[in-house]
Image (cartoon, rainbow, N blue to C red):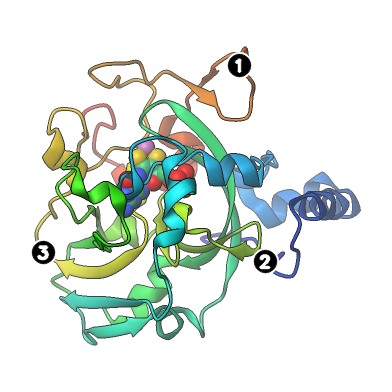
Amino acid sequence: MAHRWKNDLTYADVTAETVWLNRRQAIAGALGAGAMATIGGPALAEDLKPNSWKDITTYNNYYEFGTGKNDPAKYAHKLNTKDWSIEVDGLVNAPGRYSVADLTSDLTEEERIYRFRCVEAWSMVVPWNGFELKDILDKVGVKPDAKYVAFQTALRPDEMPGVRYSVLDWPYREGLRLDEAMHPLTMMATGIYGKTIPNQNGAPIRLVVPWKYGFKSIKSIVRITLTDKEPVTSWNMANRGEYGFYSNVNPNVDHPRWSQATERQIGGGLFAKRVPTKMLNGYEEEAGVLYAGSDLNALF
Ligand SMILES: Nc1nc2c(c(=O)[nH]1)N[C@H]1C(S)=C(S)[C@@H](COP(=O)(O)O)O[C@H]1N2
Ligand SMILES: [Mo]
């Protein structure tokens, strides 16, 4: 039961988005709705329709390349993702500098179609490829006194035109509680639509935590630190009252400057109706267990 939403189908060999979608429909048709539910589990059973490649790769937040939604698509090609390494340190048994391949090569790559909800109240559906963060952490061996995981994005002024502006305290930093990091829905993505993840989406490897606001899903990770203290995070440092450490998607708790009750679906067109936002972005059944005993409306 624990892994019931795992999708054991991969589309890594499919290149075109239309082929990918047709193949999904063909598979859904062949297996029938019941079979798809077994593969996808409750979170995926509604058979979410992913946004287009174009939506996903041209409407981005990646402030290291500028604050405009199209800036990352325009400038992120400057980021050199070759020979990328991740420093893993803190409370781990095997600290060190790892290549992405070192961390992932013997792990099971999966496809996960997740809702993605930005704190700015827009949303998409993204077909990610990647790995459970838990499998990566198990590989380096988390020490028993670790309680949190801290993440850092690369900071390369020569390649990132946006970092000369102090909109955020660079490098971009994020963090999770250890149990959130170990949750089977939490993944490290290296692909979208079966293709290598584009730079603007966080190449070569980025976090994806589908029940939290998008800013928690930190891109282009160069450092992972296991720690016993709640990590500082860039958005929390920028505005303590607006961006909490937890930042779980919650339609009942408004941002101080706008409502979080509804969202605008990217790709829906200019006159599309906003849709209601779901508690924990629709992943309450899976991720709610992390917050059992705490009031989700108070956990900021
Ligand atoms: N390093 C870094 N990671 C980041 C951001 C950023 O500006 N820098 N933006 C965050 C925000 S606000 C969102 S909504 C998502 C956007 O991911 P996407 O562009 O793949 O949709 O990335 C998050 N991760
Ligand atoms: Mo965001």
**Relative side of 274 to 200, left or right:** right
User: How far across and how far down the image is residue 66, in percent?
Assistant: 33, 42
User: How far across and how far down the image is residue 269, in percent?
Assistant: 64, 21
User: What residue would you read off at disc 2?
Assistant: 8
Q: Is residue 122 visible?
A: yes
As shown in the figure, which amino acid type bears the numbered disc 1? Answer: Leu
Instruction: State the residue in front, 51 or 91.
Output: 51
Task: Look at discs 3 and 1 and give the one toward the viewer.
Answer: 1
Task: Look at discs 1 and 2 and give the one toward the viewer.
Answer: 1
Q: Earlier in the sequence, mark 3 or mark 2?
A: 2
CB under 8 Å between discs 3 and 1: no
User: How far across and how far down the image is residue 32, in percent?
Assistant: 86, 48
Ligand 2 occupies quarter: top left
Q: State the quadrant of the N terminus.
A: bottom right
User: How far across and how far down the image is residue 48, in percent?
Assistant: 66, 40
Instruction: Using the numbered discs, state the Cα–Cα distance from disc 3 to disc 2 in whole angstroms.
Output: 34 Å
For image coordinates 14% across by 47% down, the residue present is: 169
Q: Is residue 211 visible?
A: no
Instruction: Using the numbered discs, state the Cα–Cα distance from disc 3 to disc 1 in whole angstroms.
Output: 46 Å
User: What residue would you read off at disc 3?
Assistant: 228
Q: Secondary structure at mark 1?
A: loop
As shown in the figure, which amino acid type bears the numbered disc 3? Answer: Asp
Vertical placement of residue 261 versus 45, above or below: above
Q: Label 1 neighbourhood size at 10 Å, few (<14), some (14-19), many (20+)? A: few
Q: Secondary structure at mark 3?
A: loop
Identify the mark at residue 164; answer none if there is no mark: none
Instruction: State the residue in front, 123 or 182.
Output: 123
**Relative side of 102 to 113, left or right:** left
CB under 8 Å between discs 3 and 2: no
Q: Quadrant of residue 118?
A: top left
